[in-house]
Amino acid sequence: MSRPISSSAALPVAYVLLRILIIVNWLGGAAILALLVVLPHEQWIMTSFKLSPSPEAERLVMGLRLMAVLGLAAIPLNHAVLKRLLAIVETVREGDPFVAANASRLQAIAWALLALQILSLVMGAVAKSVSTPAHPLDIDAGFSINGWLAVLLTFLLARVFAEGSLMREDLEGTV
Amino acid sequence: MAIAVKLDDLLHDRRMTLTELADRVGMTLANLSILKTGKARAIRFSTLEAICEALSCQPGDILRFEPEQAERERPAA
C-alpha cells in the first residue's frame, strides 16, 4: 500500500522550509546588527520614526535599541530550534525518529522556546515602558498563551520521545 | 543479567544445531543467536512456546535465575 501523499510531501517541504528559515533568521540577525552598529545615529532613528527631540523621544530611542539587542539575542535561540528541528526531520526521512537523540533535541528546543518566551515578555515590558500616547509603540511581543502552551507541549513531547525511545530499545532486544 | 539462557546445553543434549532450531521454530538465526548469548532484553511467550515444542522441554529448562556475584554479596555487606 502506498503512503498518503500528504505525509510523503510534508517532509521534503519541511526540510526545505527549515533550511530557508535558518538563512532568513541569520539575515534578520544581520539586519538587526546593522541597525545597531552601522546606524547608531540617534538623529537617523528620530527622522525614521518622525520624532521631534524630547526626553520622551530619547527614551523611545533607547527602548528601541534595547529591543534590538533583545531581538539579537533571539537569533541564536531561533537557530538552535530550527537546527534541531531539521535534524529531527532528517531522522524521520531516514525512517528512525524514535531515538534518544531526538528526545534530547526536543528537550533543547523546549528550553530555547522557554527562553524566547521570556525574551518576548521582556520586550513587551520594554515597549510598554517607553510607549507614550504621543509616540505609541505597538509591537508583537509580551505574554502569549499559545507560546507558553508550545513550551509546555514541547517539554511533554520530549518526555514522550524519551519514553518511546526506551520502549523501542526494549522492543529491539525482544526475541 | 541474572537470567541465564541454557539453550547451548539443551541443544547439545538434543544433538541439534542452532540453525536446525531456527528452522524448526521459524526464527532467524541472528535472533536465536541473540537469545543464546544472553543479549536479549526480553522473550515473547510465542518464542518460548515454539522453542519448548521444538526441544520438548519446559521454560524452566531454558531459563535459569542465577544471581550475579555483586547481588549475592550485597545483603551480607
Image (cartoon, coloured by chain):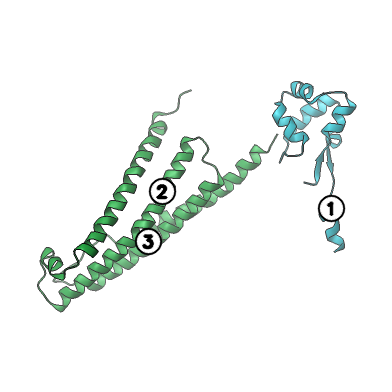
Chain colours: A green, B cyan
User: Given the image, what chain letter belongs to the residue carrying mark 3?
Assistant: A
Query: Mark 3 — residue?
Result: A117
How would you rate the neighbour count of disc 3 (Cα within 10 Å): few for under 14, some for 14-19, many for 20 or more?
A: many
Q: Amino acid at mark 2?
A: Lys
Is disc 1 placed on a helix, strand or loop?
helix
Which part of the image, by quadrant, shows the C terminus of chain B? bottom right
**Image-quadrant location for residue B42:** top right
**CB contact under 8 Å: marks 1 and 2:** no
Q: Chain of mark 1?
A: B
Helix, strand or loop under label 3: helix
Tell me which chain the residue with mark 2 is part of. Answer: A
For marks 1 and 2, give the CA distance.
Answer: 47 Å
The crowding category of the residue bearing disc 1, from other C-alpha atoms within 10 Å (few below 14, some 14 to 19, many at least 20), is: few
Residue receiving disc 2: A83
What is the total number of numbered labels drawn onto the structure image?
3
User: Which residue does the image show at 87% across and 62% down from the upper left?
Assistant: B76
Q: Earlier in the sequence, mark 3 or mark 2?
A: 2
Q: CA distance from mark 1 to mark 3?
A: 52 Å
Q: Amino acid at mark 3?
A: Gln
Q: CA distance from mark 3 to mark 2?
A: 18 Å
Q: Are marks 1 and 2 on the same chain?
A: no
Q: Name the residue carrying label 1.
A: B69
Q: Secondary structure at mark 2?
A: helix
- Image quarter of residue B19: top right
Judge left or right: residue A5 versus residue B8: left
At x 78% / y 24%, what residue is drawn? B21
